[in-house]
Image (cartoon, helix red, strand yellow):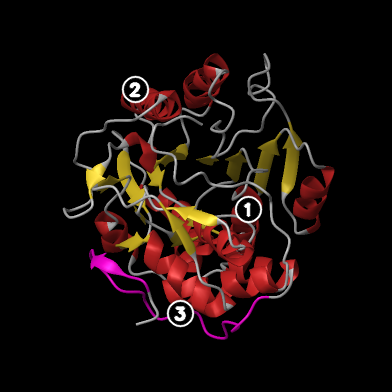
Amino acid sequence: MDTPRSMPNVAQEGDPPAGLPARIETVAQLDDVLTSPSASLVRSLSALKGDLLILGVAGKMGPTLARLARRGLDAAGSRSRIVGVARFGERAVRDQLAEVGIETVQADLLAPGALDRLPDAANVVYMAGRKFGSTGNEEITWTANTFLPGLVARRYADARIVVLSTGNVYPFTPVAGPAPDESQPTGPVGEYAQSCLGRERVFEYFSRQNDTPCVLVRLCYAIDLRYGVLLDIARKVSAGQPIDLSQGFVNLIWQGDANEAILRSLEFCASPPLVMNLTGPDNLSVRQMADALGRRLGKQPIFESEEQPNALLVSAKRYCQLMGPLRISLEKMLDWVAGWVQIGGPTLNKPTHYEVRDGDF
C-alpha cells in the first residue's frame, strides 16, 4: 500500500475540495490552493463580528492564513477589516498582503508603546513567537514567548483570541499507545517547549482574570510545499542523504487545513480557554513516508539509526470532533511534495528539525 499510515487514530480524510490539481508547479498555484476557503469556513466567518487582527502575520503560515481569511470574509459578504502586524523583514510580504486587501502595520511588538498604537479588534489571531535560535539566547525566547503574551492579553482583553501554541508542550509518548489528548499532563522538553507552555499559562491567567474568550491551539507539523517534514524527508531522499529514524513517528496536517482550523477556532473561544490539538488523525511512520516519497522520486531512501519506542505525538480527536475530517489527504501531500522537489520548486530553506529529541533548538 502506497500510503504510509500506521496506528490510525480517529478519522479518515473528508471529501477533498473539488478541482484539486494532480501536481502543483508554481507558487501562485500553491497559494491559490492554500487560500481557497471551504464552505464550512465561509459559514463560520459569516458569523464573525468585528475586525480581525493577526499578530505575527509574516511567519511561515501567516501570509496564507491572512489571504484565506480575506477570501473567506469576501465570500461571506463581510466588510470586516483584516490587519496584519509584523516586523516585515521582507518588504515583498507586506506588499503581497496589501495587494489582496489586507491592511498591514510594521511593528516590533516588544517595543514600548507598540501595542498601544495598534487598532482595536474584536478578533485576534496570535501567531508571534520564537523557536529557532533559542539555545544560547534563552532569555530572548522566554521574553518573546511569555512576557509579550501578557502584554497582548491585557491590550486585547475584550477580544476573542486564538493563540498558536505547539505540540512540543507534551512529553514524548510511547508509539504503541494512544497519543496524548488535551486532558493529559504536559511535559515540555527543553527551554523552547517550556516557554511555549509559559505562553499558554499567561494567556490562561488573563483569560480567567478578564473573562477573555480564548482558544489555545497546539499545532503539530503543518505542511506546505516550501517547508515541512515531508519536504525535509523528500529532499534527503532526492539527494541520497541519510534520514534519521530516531524520531520515527510524527503527526502532519496540510497548512491549508491548519489555517482553516485556526480561523474557525474563533467561534469556539471560551474562558477559561479551550485547548485544541491541531494535526492529522494518524501517527505516521517516517520510514514509510520516506519509502513512499522514494517511489515517487525514483530513489531508494537511505536510513540511519533506529526508531525509538517513543515520539512527540498528539491526538487530534477533539479537532476532528469540532471541525470534521481533513480536506487534504496524506496521499495528496506526498504527491505534491514529490512533484515540487522534482521540479526544483522554491523553498523557505527552513528545516523543521522534527528529528530533534532533546528540545535543543
Q: Which residues are magenta?
A: 4-24
Q: Tell which circle, 2 or 3, labels the residue nearer the N-terminal end.
A: 3
Q: For the residue labelled by badge 2, is the local secondary structure a helix, a strand or a loop? A: helix
Tag 2 and tag 3, C-beta contact below 8 Å: no
Which amino acid, mark 3?
Pro
> On screen, 50 above or below 39?
above
Q: Nearer the viewer, residue 70 or 49?
A: 70
247 is within the stretch colored magenta: no
Q: How many marks?
A: 3
Q: Is residue 258 left or right of residue 121?
A: left
Q: Nearer the viewer, residue 141 or 318?
A: 141
Marker disc for residue 66: 1
**Mark nearer the viewer, 2 or 3:** 3
Image quadrant where one finds the N terminus: bottom left
Q: At which x and y percent is residue 80?
A: 62, 52
Which amino acid, mark 1?
Ala
Which amino acid, mark 2?
Tyr
Residue carrying label 3: 16
Q: Nearer the viewer, residue 34 or 281?
A: 281
Residue carrying label 2: 205
Q: Is residue 248 left or right of residue 148?
A: left
Q: For the residue labelled by badge 3, is the local secondary structure a helix, a strand or a loop? A: loop
**Mark nearer the viewer, 3 or 1:** 3
